[in-house]
Structure formats: C-alpha cells, structure tokens
Image (cartoon, grey):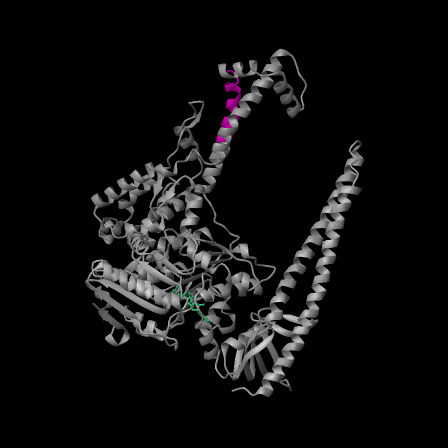
Amino acid sequence: MMTDKVKAQEQAHLDEVISKVRAAEKVEEQKGSKAKQDVDEINHNFYNDVRLKTTTYSGMMETALTIRQQQQMLTERQTRQSYAAKQLATLQKMEINPYFARLDFHENGEQNAETIYIGMASFTDRPDHYLIYDWRAPISSIYYDGGIGKVTYQTPAGEQTVDVKLKRQFQIANGEIKTVFDTEEVVGDQMLLDALGNQSDTKMKSIVTTIQKEQNQIIRDTKSELLFVQGAAGSGKTAAILQRVAYLLYQYRGHLNSAQVILFSPNQLFNDYINQVLPELGEQNMVQMTFYQYSSHRLPNMQVETLGERFDEQFNPEKKAATTMKGSLQYFKAVTAYANHLNKEDMRFRNIVFKGRVLIAKEKIAEIYYGFNENYNLRNRLDGTKEALLKILNRKIHVEMKTDWVEEAVQNLTKEQIQKMHHDAETEIQDADKEFNFLARGIVTQAFQKVRRQIVRNHFLTITHQFVHFLRSVPQIINLRDYGLTKEEWSDNVDSVIEDIKQNKLAMADVAPYLYLYDLMTGKRGQKDIKYLFIDEVQDYSAFQLAFLKFSFPRAKFTLLGDLNQAIFTHENSQQLLNELGTMFDKSKTRVIQLTKSYRSTAQITNFTKHLLTDGEAIEAFDRQGELPQIHVVSDEAKALEAVKVQVASNLKIHETTAIIGKTLTECEHIYELLKSSGVKATLIRTENQRLVNGVIIVPSYLAKGLEFDSVVMWNASTNEYPDDADRQLVYTICTRAMHRLTIVAIEQLSPLFKEVPQTEYELIED
Ligand SMILES: Nc1ncnc2c1ncn2[C@@H]1O[C@H](COP(=O)(O)OP(=O)(O)OP(=O)(O)O)[C@@H](O)[C@H]1O
C-alpha cells in the first residue's frame, strides 16, 4: 500500500501541473479570442471597405486582388481560431485528468534517473520541457512493454534500452488523485480489473491506460503490409485497432489524415458502437463502412442482399456449394483470366442510340475495340475506343443537321433563344444559309451531349451481359467438381442469378465478382490514396472479397482482425481463408499476432464459453469473478418466457443492460411480442441502422457481432433451433457477448452444442 507521504507528494506535483495547464488554457483562450476578433474585423471590413470597381479592367483586377487577399487572411485566422479551440479542448480534458502513469528510468550513460508522466496528450510548459508525454510518444512504449528493469523501445533513431526503476499508476478524477500504486508488472492487473468491472455502455471507450503488451505490438506496428490479428472473443482486437488508428495518426501527423484510413466493420450498429473512441483520443474518426455499404454505394441501381437475407440464405444447402466457390481465390483468378481473354474476343457491346435510332452499331464498336494492336490492355482499348467513338459522333453532327427534326427545331426557336446562342458562341447574326447552319449545329451539338456523356461513361459496355457470359463460361475455367457442383447445378444457379439481375437484385456472393469484372473491363486502377485498411471480423469475408479489396486499395497496408471461431457466415472455410490470405501478401511483410486472453467476460463466462468450441483450450480467462452462467431447460414456451422475465427484472435491478439474443430476426420478433404482451418493455433491433439503447434490447445473432452487453439472455437454445455443429460458431458468438451475466433458456431439450461444457461450469435449472 502506498504511503500517505507519496500520495501527498504526487498530489503536490499534480497540483503544479494542473496550474500550468490552467495557465496554458488562458493563453489559448486569448489566442482564440484574438483570432475571432480578427475574423469579425475582416468580415466587417469586407462588407464596408471593399469598393467594387468594375468599370475598368484595372479596377476589376484591383477589386479581385483585394477580395483574394481578404479571403486568404480570413482563412488563415479561421484556421488559427479552430486550432486554438482544439488546443483548449485538449487542455480542458487534461485539467481534469492529466496523466495516468509515471516512470522513472535510467538511460544508458546518463548519471541521473529521469522521471516522465504519461497522459492522453503531450504538454510542455516551455520548448522541449515535457511535463506530460503523449501515450503514443516513443518513450511511452516502455510503460506498456515491460515491468521493472531493462526495457527496449523503438525511437526514430533506432532501438533504445533503458533501466526502469519505478512504475507508478494513478487514478485521477477532477484533479484529485484517487488511488496511486507502484507496480512491477507490465500494466497492473488491479487497474485493468477496475476498468473491466465497469458497466457496459452503448459506446465503446478507449483503453489507453491499460493497453496490454500484445495489444501494444498491434498498435505500434508500422512495418507489416499485412498484420493479421487472430484472437478469442473479447480479447481486445477491436480495442487494439482503434488505438492503432490513433497511434498512426499521431506517428504520421502531416502525412496521414483520417480520410486515408478506412475501416470495414461487420454492421452499422457496430460502427455506431465504436465511433466515440477516436474523438475521445482527440482524433477524427476514420472512414467507417460495411462491405454492404461499400458495394451498394458502387451499385446504385442494384439492390444488394442485406445482412439478414444473407444470414437466412446460408441455411439453403443448394446455394451453399456455389457460394463457397464464388468466395474462393480460384474464382477471383477465374474472373481475372476471363477479363484477360476479353482482350482478344467476347467483349459485349451495346448500340449507341439517339432518338430511337442506332447511331453507332455495336458491331462497329466491336470492330474499333478489337482493331487495336494486340499489346493493348483493356484500359487502353477502352480509352482508344472512346476517343474513336467521340470522333465519329462529331462527324455525325453534319449528317444529323440535315434531318427533319433539326429543321423543325430551328424554326421553333424563339428570338431570345437565338440571341442567347449567338451570345454564348460570341458570333454575329449572318446570312440565311450560314445562320441556319449555325443554329442547326448548335441544336445537334446540344442534343448529342447526352450521347457524349454516355460514351464517356462507358454506356456502350454492358456489364450485366458480360457478367452472365462470364458465369456461363465458368465451367470452362474452373473444375466444378472441386466444389461438389455438377454442370446442371451450376447452370441452375446462373439462371437464378439472371432472375435476380432482372429484378435489379444481386446476392452478396455475386457482388464482388460483378464489381471486379467491371473494374477490369473499364481498367479502373483502385483508390491509391487510402494508406491503411482495417477489417474487423475478417472471418466473415470470403477470400474473393479480400482479394478484391486488395485490388481496390492497392497502396493500403492491411490490418485484419478475426476470430476463426466466430465465423458465422463462412463456417468451416475460415481455416482455408487464412491459408489463402497467405498467398495474397508477401510473406516477409506479414505478421500474425495471437491474442488468447479474454477481457470482456468474467472468468466464469469465459471458462464456460471456451467449452463451446472444440479447440477452445488455448483461451485464457482474465481473473474477474462473477456468477456461474445459468442454463434453464423448461418444458414449454410460457415457462421459458417466465424465466426470461425473472432474469431481466433481476438484471434491471442492478441497472444492467440486457441483450436477449435470438438466432434469426423472426425468432426475435416472436420473443418481442411475447414480452410485450406480458408488459415487459424492450427494444427490438430489427436492422443495423438502428441505435443501441440502454435497458432491455432484443437482437438477432448476426447483428450482435462485435458488441457487448452487461447481461446476455440466449433465447431458445433448443435442439431444434441449434441442432448440430453447423451452429457451433454462432452459439459461441452469442454467448461471448456477455460481460457479467449469461443466461441460456432452452425449451424441451437443450442444444447438443452445450454437451461438452462440464457441469461445474454452469448452474442448471430445470422445471
Ligand atoms: N487492455 C484493455 N484494457 C481495458 N479494457 C480492455 C482492454 N482490452 C480489451 N478491453 C475491453 O474488453 C472488451 C472486449 O474487447 P474488444 O471488443 O476489443 O474484443 P474483440 O476481440 O474485438 O471481441 P469480439 O471478437 O468478441 O468482438 C471491451 O470492453 C474492451 O474495452
């Protein structure tokens, strides 16, 4: 236990730092109000002083220059104002809780030990005199990486080793030290225990004060092209990558901004859940989206299969084999090979039509397209074709001018319209023939604008026909038998895709191949400005989707997070996914980090859930104690409902948020109605676009991904709902959402998936 003397000394130091922070706040306030005053003044002057001199050329130039100068000054002052406001906000946070750790250490060759304090941001009272170091500074790494003694850390100049003499942790609230303790461990378990004992929230929080050593490796990795983090449920993968984004933004400030970082997340609810972490760390959020959002944004005229539809569809065994093939790397290679073949033949074209007439026939387009040298690639071919088509279009103006509709249109022009055409073209009215030609040319050129746009936008290609042609060609490229498919089954599958396309619908399995083919046909190069790409819950992606993302973001470094035990969409292929990933990235620049300790749940819940897996032994529980999970096996639905009601009431008494998780949306709607009619207030989360709320919520399993709740009630864990191994990973995902309490309710017979859990790990309640 820390002596009162130490605490008093630390409080005195804290008081001093806070007073300096307050002084700095004053300075920023002054800077801010000075900048604001300047902005107001410039605005005022602008309206009162700038004389618009527009009668002479030099007058106009003078006015333009003055306006430009004023604008530049205004922008500069506004930047100053917002910078001061940002600094002030950081200082105000710092005033309440300036730091969380102190380190005393000896640097090689130095006489005296150095003392540093680590907080959410750096603070200096004079140049290079750091009272607080940002947690992301190189030196701060030693706090996360080691205990007492020799610790090595990376600096811009290379590795440094220091001898750590003291490691002290603080809990500070409102400028007052609540607890202070010295530790010899990496990050004291007590501090972590306190952090984890908290109640869940609808928003995730930052973990800066208690980042674990392995997480620190993830956060500070700057070398890997592919960083793959495999970790048990609740092992802090998501937490680690959010702090990693903050770290990267700090490390590469000036060279990397939040718009160059993109995170693919499992669903919109999850996006909402994590979107406070970066602002809390003083950074802007990166671009966050789901794969569904990304693809539907690129396919505005198509209805992409939703998460719920996709989840339900996987229970359809006929589609499963085809879906597996469509998700494979081999299929990706097949699309690539097919596109290469389009360099020689088979590109499908559409007539270019104007006023219901064929203006340029598709055969003509094909002739142009395949008329180029065989060394041309698809992009050059397309560019060359477009250029040629635009030339043809220009030549056609002359012919079109002689048609009846043009003559009629010229005669119908009003005087104003004629004047405007002359004004726009800066021409004078001329003799009758020339005048007619001038007006007719104007009308045709205008009318051809739409055709011109269509050419520029590749409308003469036809992606859907091409895609169908590709699908029909698949049996010549891939051995269908490798995926347990016959030619007839494949042909039926293609027919159903065509049916979907006719209704402007596309299944998730077809989306990435469709987009990829389109990108290859049009020679799209991918978004080069994205420098870091993160994928959470990568086990739910197919190898095809990952390869497609790699193609679409060619300059990005990838960080992939996943738990192969939670693959709820891809199932047994997840191991294969890992192997396929290996072939996509350079091995020497690939790093795999395993996280085995689970922080989310109490030891009782983690020990229970790990038995749901066939190979869960490696998962380590963090020593936070709680109640044993309860399994209720009851004879009918009424009793099941009763059990849920009792549990929910008991959870609410201790203000816990409870999530009732059902397998499908239909199941969730059912329990929602049951609860409603018996007077229990609950929120049903039907789609990922809703917001999480406190209290009782009902969520379908596939939307609970990545989230956590104080208490979880797994609804209807019965044999007929979860009959066999196919649902093992789903059951694991559901149960691992619980932080403090887990209740499982089964009707008639408990699912066999719980069979391997030892009786000592739960409390069984039967009626
Ligand atoms: N170092 C840490 N300090 C404090 N809390 C932590 C730490 N690491 C993780 N946590 C907490 O543990 C919980 C689980 O973390 P997180 O959601 O990142 O896990 P995950 O591996 O992404 O889980 P899943 O795969 O099940 O979605 C979160 O509440 C997170 O804040």
| Nearer-the-camera pick, 581 or 239 | 239
| Nearer-the-camera pick, 742 or 638 | 638
Q: Is residue 161 above or below residue 461?
A: below
| Residue 376 appears anywhere in the view | no
Q: Please indicate whether residue 118 sits to the left or right of residue 485 in the image.
A: right
| Quadrant of residue 470 within the rendered picture | top left
| Nearer-the-camera pick, 747 or 163 | 747
| Residue 260, horizontal then vertical, whole percent | 53, 55
Quarter the C terminus occupies: bottom left
| Residue 615, horizontal then vertical, whole percent | 28, 70
| Residue 598, horizontal then vertical, whole percent | 38, 71
Q: Quadrant of ligand 1?
A: bottom left
| Residue 201, horizontal then vertical, whole percent | 45, 64
| Quadrant of residue 667 within the rendered picture | bottom left
- Counting labels gives 0
| Quadrant of residue 66 within the rendered picture | top right
Q: Main secondary structure of the magenta part?
A: helix
Residue at (26% x, 45% y) in the render: 475
Q: Please indicate whether residue 549 sits to the left or right of residue 485 in the image.
A: right
Q: What segment is highlighted magenta in the picture?
A: 389-402
Q: Is residue 108 above or below residue 55?
A: below
